[in-house]
Image (spheres, rainbow, N blue to C red):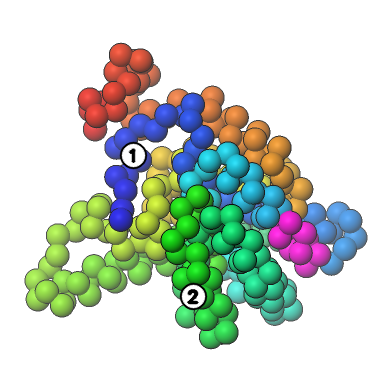
C-alpha cells in the first residue's frame, strides 16, 4: 500500500510525527574524543539505536527509519567496513527476538545484492518473522543511497513499459510506488546527529517537505531525551506545503478542503 504524498496533505504537527528518519552520525568522533578506536563508537551506537527504537514505540511513532550504511560508506577503510558488517549481523541476531516480542516490524532497504548471502538470508528471515507486526515499522537503510533509489524506481518503470509494449504513464504516484520505502508515508521529521547539516544521499525524493532537525549530539549520546527535544522542535513548526499561514487557520483545518 502506498500513501498520499505529504506534500499534498497537511499533517497535524501537534500530534507525534508518524514517520521519523534519522542520519545516525558522529560515532567516529564520539570515540576519538575518548581516545578510543572509531569502531568503539559504532558499538556504542547500537545502544542508541535500541534506546531510540524503544522511545519511538512508546511515543506512538509509526515509522522509524535509520541510515546505517550509505552507498558511499564502502569508501571507508576495509577494516571499518568489515566491522560494521559484523556489527550489523550480531545486532540483528541479538535483537530480532526482542523487536518481534515488542510488535516491531523490521524492513531493510538498500542495494542488498552487495552484501554476502549470509547477511541477505538473515535480513530476509528477520523481515518475514516480523512482517505482521503493527506497532512500529523500523526500517534500516543499508547500502542505501537516495540516487540509487530513484534510479531503481526509474528502471522499474522502464521495465514495465517494455513488458507492456508501450510507455506506462509516468506520474509522481506511479514513480513513488517503485521506491524502496513505498510502504511508508514520507518522513515528517528528519534528524541528523553529529553536527553536519547535509543529506548525504539519504531519502532524496521522500524528504521533499520533511521538517529538518540538526543536533551536535554525537549518535552514541542520543537517547529518549534527545529524541524528545527533536519532537518538541517539530511540534513548534508550521507545515505549509506552499500555502500561506492564513490558509492553515482553524476554520480551514479540514485538510480535504485545502487547495492542493
Ligand atoms: C556514523 O558515524 C556511522 C556510519 C556512517 C556508519 P560516523 O562513522 O560517520 O562518525 P563520524 O562522522 O566519523 O564522527
Ligand atoms: C551518513 O554519514 C551515512 C550514515 C549515517 C550511514 P556519513 O558520516 O558517511 O556522511 P558524510 O559522508 O560525512 O556526509
Ligand atoms: Mg560521519
- Picture disc at residue 7: 1
**Position in image of residue 43 (x %, y %):** 76, 64
The residue positioned 59% from the left and 59% from the top of the image is: 101
Q: Residue 163 lies in what quarter of the image? A: bottom left
- Whether 244 is drawn above or below 77: the answer is above
Is 236 on the left-hand or right-hand side of 151? right
Q: Magenta region: which residues?
A: 38-47
**Position in image of residue 230 (x %, y %):** 61, 36
The residue positioned 32% from the left and 44% from the top of the image is: 5
The residue positioned farthest toward the front in the image shown? 101
Q: Is mark 2 within 8 Å of ligand 2?
A: no
SS state under label 1: loop
- Picture disc at residue 24: none
Q: What count of labels does the image hold? A: 2
Q: Residue 34 or 132: which is nearer the viewer?
A: 132
Picture quarter with the C terminus: top left
**Position in image of residue 141 (x %, y %):** 53, 63
Q: Residue 4 lies in what quarter of the image? A: top left
Quadrant of the rendered image holding ligand 1: bottom right
Amino acid at each position: 500500500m502506498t500513501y498520499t504524498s505529504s506534500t499534498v496533505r497537511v499533517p497535524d504537527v501537534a500530534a507525534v510525527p508518524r514517520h521519523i528518519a534519522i542520519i545516525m552520525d558522529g560515532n567516529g568522533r564520539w570515540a576519538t574524543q575518548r581516545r578510543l578506536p572509531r569502531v568503539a563508537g559504532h558499538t556504542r551506537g547500537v545502544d542508541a539505536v535500541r534506546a531510540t527504537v524503544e522511545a519511538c514505540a512508546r511515543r506512538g511513532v509509526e515509522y522509524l527509519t535509520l541510515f546505517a550504511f550509505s552507498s558511499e560508506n564502502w569508501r571507508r577503510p576495509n577494516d571499518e567496513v568489515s566491522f560494521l558488517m559484523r556489527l550489523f549481523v550480531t545486532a540483528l541476531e541479538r535483537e530480532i527476538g526482542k523487536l518481534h516480542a515488542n510488535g516491531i516490524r523490521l524492513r531493510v532497504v538498500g542495494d542488498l545484492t552487495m552484501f554476502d548471502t549470509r547477511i541477505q538470508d538473515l535480513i530476509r528471515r528477520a523481515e518475514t518473522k516480523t512482517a505482521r507486526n503493527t506497532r512500529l515499522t523500523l526500517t534500516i537503510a543499508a547500502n542505501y543511497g537516495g540516487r540509487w533509489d530513484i534510479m531503481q524506481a526509474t528502471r522499474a518503470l522502464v521495465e514495465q513499459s517494455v513488458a507492456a509494449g508501450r510507455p506506462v504513464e509516468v506520474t509522481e504516484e506511479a514513480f513513488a510506488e517503485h521506491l524502496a520505502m513505498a510502504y511508508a508515508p514520507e518522513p515528517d521529521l528528519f534528524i541528523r546527529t553529529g553536527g553536519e547539516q547535509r543529506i548525504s544521499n539519504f531519502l532524496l525524493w521522500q524528504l521533499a517537505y520533511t521538517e529538518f532537525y540538526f543536533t551536535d549530539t554525537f549518535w552514541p549520546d542520543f537517547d529518549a531525551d534527545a529524541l524528545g527535544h527533536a519532537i518538541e522542535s517539530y511540534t513548534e513548526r508550521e507545515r505549509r506545503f506552499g500555502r500561506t499561514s492564513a490558509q492553515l487557520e482553524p476554520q480551514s483545518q479540514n485538510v480535504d478542503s485545502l487547495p492542493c
